[in-house]
Amino acid sequence: MGSANGSPLFSFGVIADVQYADIPDGHSFLGVPRYYRHSMLVLQRAVRKWNQHGNLKFVINFGDIVDGFCPKDQSLAAVKKVVDEFGKFSGPVYHMIGNHCLYNLPREQLLPLLKIPGCSGSAYYDFSPFPGCRIVVLDGYDISAVGWPRDHPHTAAALKILEEKNPNSDKNSPEGLVGLERRYLKFNGGVGEKQLQWLDNVLRDATKTNQKVVVCGHIPMDPSVASKAAMLWNYDEVMDIIHKYDCVKLCLSGHDHKGGCSVDSHGVHHRSLEAALECPPGTSSFGYIDVYENRLSLVGTDRMKSTDFET
């Protein structure tokens, strides 16, 4: 998307799944160690390095700002603490919501804290940081069993999907679910009709105005980039819209923690980012993306692997 050998058109910082909490270290349900307090140090190192870079236009945080195990009476203070840390970056910071954010605070409280533009509680938006380029941020918990009021239509729609697709009494358990059916878990979510229509309109407009697009979402959208149990419920509907156009070059996500990359059947690159939460003390996971005319390049730090995306 400068020339391949020259300087980038622009660059932006990335980090995923900070999941900070002022509690002792723990493990995921799969037994992977989680370092709840250390993740704040990872973020602090990231902000320092982004500021030292001196030429990042903005930073994107890929959601799960605090962890679900954060004591509920500390949730608000914990979110504010992490937001303040991001605020030490010298430029704009764009947030998105993840499931752990919603375990802690309802949307009505969370969205203003994260300065997420949106109406009626929705958390999807787009912006153009540079001529010829657009960043699209999806709300993967638009249809979700967490975050909306109990009597909200989006909650009802999510519970109906889980009831139909997941026979387990614990809707976070993939027990007995096979292959891609394993994505029908309560900690995932879906993109609603209104947002799908919005995405279609944005991509149509980007195509008309010759913009290249990077799509960002908390939940992965390609079965080859992440665990089948960490996929957007209706990733296929989202990708059908993306594949209608040639403007989307890269889909970035968090949520899966271990990181991965793939190229789908239409040549769109997918990259799920390694989690800050799972960095043992002294290690880090963050980076920045250089955007060129015909490629993007993720320059990773430590556990976040550097990756080139030819477009």
Image (cartoon, rainbow, N blue to C red):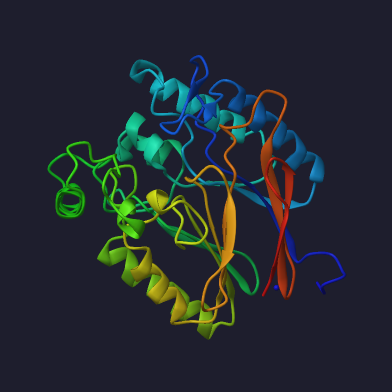
Q: Residue at x 52, y 79 (%)?
A: 266
| Relative to 31, residue 223 above or below | below
Quadrant of the image containing the C terminus: bottom right
For the point 56% across and 72% down, the residue is 268
Residue 113 is situated, as x and y percent measured from the top left of the image, at: 43, 35
Across and down, in percent, residue 34 comes to: 53, 27
* Residue 84 image position (x, y, % from top left): 57, 29
Left or right, 253 with reference to 88: left
| Residue 131, placed above or below residue 252 | below
The answer to which of 303 and 149 lies nearer the viewer is 303
The one nearer the camera, 284 or 182, is: 182
Q: Residue furthest bottom?
A: 208
For image coordinates 51% across by 48% down, the residue present is 254
Locate the N terminus by quadrant: bottom right
Out of 297 and 171, give the one closest to the viewer.
171
Total numbered labels placed on residues in the image: 0
Q: Position of residue 143 (x, y in %)?
A: 26, 53
**Residue, far left:** 151
In the rendered structure, the answer to whether residue 139 lies left or right of residue 214 reads left
Along the viewing direction, whichever of 53 and 177 lies nearer the viewer:
177
Q: Is residue 95 left or right of residue 232?
A: right
Report the side of 170 relative to 41 (left or right).
left
242 lies above or below 177: below
